[in-house]
Amino acid sequence: MKIAIDKLHFTYPIGLEALKGISLVVEPGEQVAIVGQNGAGKTTLARHLNGLLKPTSGSVFIGDWETTKFSTAKLAARVGYVFQNPDEQLFSRDVVTEVSFGPRNLGYAKGKVDELVERAMALTELNGKAEANPYDLSPAWRKMVALASIIAMDTPIVIFDEPTTGQDAVNVARIAHVISELKREGRTVVVITHDIDFCAENFERVIALSQGRVLLDGSTREVLGQEDILAQTYVEPPQLTRLGKRLGLKETVTTQEEFIKSLA
């Protein structure tokens, strides 16, 4: 499902102008990472996609729906949003009830709900924790419960807000696998992240924000290769990208595989 944003401005009630005329399009099935320093407008932008925030001016379309004309509850059928802190999202007494809440609330038949829940829990490796209270689990596993609860809603667009924050390498790999599967299914994934290595390894397009405006927008290789411009938003390319530049490699590299291939 296409996301179309046109001349989006947003000012908070305190008078802070957080978004200053953002226009961009995300095509169906794209995997997009939004990067930038704290205060750049990343989360403010993402929260316009599911109607948590409404434009001060400009427009946001999710498919053929303009977000100002639909409630957040309605938009939840098209856009799933995984919060940075899972504790802001979880409320049920056990994992399976939590994961089934979304699809049940969207009105799916029981058989469809069961199928979606089973798949989401398998994808996030939660099958052995179905009866556990989410708050008895570690923060890493609570993150997976939050992911599963959104995946089970089967939305065409999924937004992850800082998915790797506070996660160990094993859980980061799980999250990467989830994103890979969503891509395989043709779902659009938008991620807000400070984890530039995770961004480089898992996303094909990067949008860099600075002070409420789009600073860069292009393929991961194109954006991460522009070190001087990225510095304006205090984003450093991955270490391998910077090392490749220092070694004089002809192409911008973003992953170990690209680095080794360029050296060879």
Image: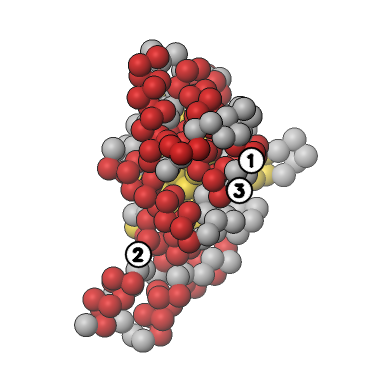
Cα distance between the residues tagged 2 and 3? 32 Å
Mark 2 residue crowding within 10 angstroms, few (<14) / some (14–19) / many (20+):
some
What is the quadrant of residue 11 in the picture?
A: top right
Residue at point 37% right, 61% down? Answer: 201
**107 lies above or below 146:** above
| Amino acid carrying mark 2 in the image | Arg
Residue 172 appears at what percent x and percent y? 46, 56
What is the quadrant of residue 232 in the picture?
A: bottom right
Residue at point 60% right, 43% down? Answer: 137
**125 lies above or below 172:** above
| Amino acid carrying mark 3 in the image | Pro
Residue 239 appears at what percent x and percent y? 45, 75
Name the residue nearer the viewer: 93 or 201: 93
Residue contact between numbered discs 3 and 1, judged by CB atoms under 8 Å: no
Marks counted in the figure total 3
For the residues carrying marks 3 and 1, which lies nearer the camera in this image? 1
What is the quadrant of residue 248 in the picture?
A: bottom left
- Earlier in the chain: of badge 1 and badge 2, it is 1
**251 lies above or below 223:** below
Cα distance between the residues tagged 3 and 1? 9 Å
- Earlier in the chain: of badge 2 and badge 3, it is 3
Residue 181 appears at what percent x and percent y? 32, 43
For the residues carrying marks 1 and 2, which lies nearer the camera in this image? 1
User: Which mark, by number, is residue 7?
Assistant: none
**112 lies above or below 87:** above
**Which element type, helix, strand or loop, lies under badge 3?**
helix
Residue contact between numbered discs 2 and 3, judged by CB atoms under 8 Å: no
| Amino acid carrying mark 1 in the image | Asp
**Which element type, helix, strand or loop, lies under badge 2?**
helix
Label 1 sits on residue: 136
Label 3 sits on residue: 139
Label 2 sits on residue: 221
